[in-house]
Image (cartoon, rainbow, N blue to C red):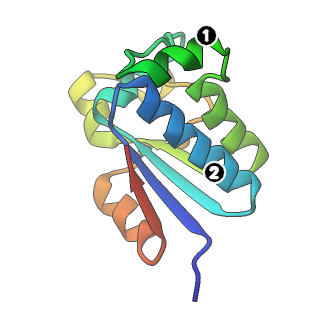
């Protein structure tokens, strides 16, 4: 049996990783998949209200994304939440470490979630990590 469940763990601060995770979330969600994203570690800072989406690049492709005016990774995640079945959660542990509250985060993020719950929900589906 093929699962229609896609789970993404996002921890990187690199533009290419953030971009690919956003692309998988948005395309997966608008294609009818159930998508769940846990944003943690170095990635969470980009989802604070008013935070820049200018992430460091790892190489040439990251530079090209800017030059070609590709949609930002934050736009892709927001579209995934608005246009498809994507639930995007901040990691509760990362929030504690950073000292941020849920109200400090972008409004398209769902309630905070811990890794244990996320992994339990991901059971039986695809799991991607960036």
Q: How far across and down, in percent of the image, does residue 121 sit?
A: 44, 68
Residue 85, how many percent across, how many down? 69, 55
Taking the view exactly as shown, the residue that stands out farthest to the bottom is 1
**Residue pointed to by mark 1:** 67
Q: Which residue is mark 2?
A: 86
Residue at 21%, 29% (x, y): give it: 97
Q: Nearer the viewer, mark 1 or mark 2?
A: 1
Tell me if mark 2 has few (under 14), some (14-19) or many (20+) residues whose alpha carbon lies within 10 angstroms of its own.
many
Q: Quadrant of residue 68?
A: top right
Point 33% across, 37% down: residue: 11
- The residue drawn where x is 57% and y is 28% is 73
User: In which quadrant is the N terminus drawn?
Assistant: bottom right
Q: Nearer the viewer, residue 60 or 77?
A: 60
Few, some or many C-alpha atoms within 10 Å of disc 1 (few <14, some 14-19, many ≥20)? few
Residue 92 is situated, as x and y percent measured from the top left of the image, at 33, 41
SS at circle 1: helix
Residue 47 percent across, percent down from the top left: 48, 24
Which quarter of the rendered picture does the C terminus lie within? top left
- Spatial distance from mark 1 to mark 2, Cα to Cα? 28 Å
Is 115 drawn above or below residue 50 in the view shown?
Answer: below
């Amino acid at each position: 049996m093929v699962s229609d469940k896609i789970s993404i763990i996002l921890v990187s601060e690199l533009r290419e990783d953030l971009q690919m995770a956003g692309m998988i979330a948005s395309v997966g969600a608008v294609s009818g998949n159930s998508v769940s994203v846990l944003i943690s570690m170095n990635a969470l800072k980009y989802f604070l209200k008013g935070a820049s989406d200018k992430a460091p690049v790892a190489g040439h492709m990251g530079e090209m994304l800017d030059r070609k005016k590709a949609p930002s990774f934050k736009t892709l995640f927001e579209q995934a939440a608005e246009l498809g079945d994507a639930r995007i959660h901040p990691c509760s542990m990362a929030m504690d470490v950073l000292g941020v509250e849920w109200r400090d985060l972008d409004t398209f993020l769902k309630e905070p979630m811990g890794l244990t719950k996320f992994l339990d929900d991901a059971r039986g589906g695809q799991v991607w990590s960036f």
